[in-house]
Image (tube, rainbow, N blue to C red):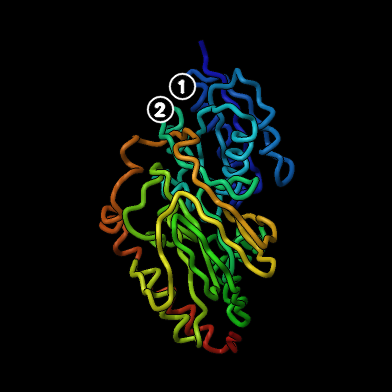
Amino acid sequence: MPKKVLFIVNPHAGKGQIRNHLLEITDTLVKADCEVTVYTTQHQGDAIRVTRERDKSYQLVVCSGGDGTLDEIVTGMMQSGFKTTVGYIPAGSTNDFANSLKLPSQMKKAADIVAAGHTFACDVGVFNHDVFVYIAAFGLFTEVSYGTPQEMKNALGHMAYILEGMKHLQNVKSYHIKVSYDDTVIEDDFIFGMITNSYSVGGFKNITGRNVALNDGLFEVTLIKRPNNPIELNSILTALISERVDTAYMYCFKTASLTIESGEEIAWTLDGEYGGNHTKVELSNKQQAVDIIVKKPYMVVFHTANLYLRSKFASYRNILQAHRIFVSCAFFELKL
């Protein structure tokens, strides 16, 4: 009996390339004995509704779009109260979480993986009453992810985020924040914070630390202190990209839950989309809450050192890229 599949497509993600591959992907699924229903999202948040209201007879929900589209599907899944396996065919500009899952950027190859059907139980983050798949963040550059025009993302891809981010370096803002986790309380001034379950953020691999696992029930938390000058800010970014924790400028730890409080509202981003302004957020990790299809189950749980061996040269390129950004930004007045 054919497997019932709901195929949710964001036709505007990335460069809209899904339009050129939709027939090929659908054919791949049909040949794998799937009965496919295709739905194209009409606006932001539409995938949440469609997933939440899906019929229980669907055995697989396939997503084609960026990480934001996947976020909507997982959110709808959590709101529905019942689990259905998720297949992911990445079609966004950066595809951070797809990189963490070792999913190929070629859509036909990703469709072949979905058709093969190897599932991996992955953690999901809860942010107050919302859900995120791989990152919740505030501060420096977070507006870039949801503020960069779609047309710019389509034309320039990852470089669009870098160019848009350079505009924000001239006016860096810090926040006085109290962070509570386990039996620890931290209170300091921060320009950036991210709570992650990913190997890649913003296209940069290994930036979230070592010993990362996507199913261990733990977040990787990185909090960047307020620097005193552009040189210190440069040192911070270099430390992050080179996988080096600099305790003079940052806090890095793992936890299953934490609370972040501030005296003023802070804008957050969840999986690259606007997550609202908040003075208090409570985050918790729902261990192995969603089943996602990957190439092989063991490929997404390994020591970061293995990632380093595979992405050594990519890391060097990222470091050089970061330095080029800061050389370019030397013309800006950094207001701290």
Categorize mark 2 by other alpha carbons within 10 Å: few (<14), some (14-19), many (20+). Answer: some
Identify which residue, 43 or 19, lies in the foreground.
43
The residue positioned 44% from the left and 57% from the top of the image is 183
The residue positioned 39% from the left and 29% from the top of the image is 118
Q: Are marks 1 and 2 in contact (CB under 8 Å)?
A: yes
The residue positioned 43% from the left and 77% from the top of the image is 249
Query: Where is residue 186 drawn, in percent x and y?
Result: 49, 68
Q: What element carries label 1?
A: loop
Name the residue that disc number 2 marks: 116
- Whether residue 245 can be seen here: yes
Question: Looking at the image, is 173 positioned above or below residue 71?
Answer: below
Quadrant of the rendering where the C terminus is positioned: bottom right
Question: Looking at the image, is 6 positioned above or below residue 140?
Answer: above
Name which residue type carries label 2.
Ala
Identify which residue, 234 or 229, lies in the foreground.
229
As drawn, the label of residue 32 is: 1
Q: Which comes before the other along the chain, label 1 or label 2?
A: 1
Identify which residue, 65 or 229, lies in the foreground.
229
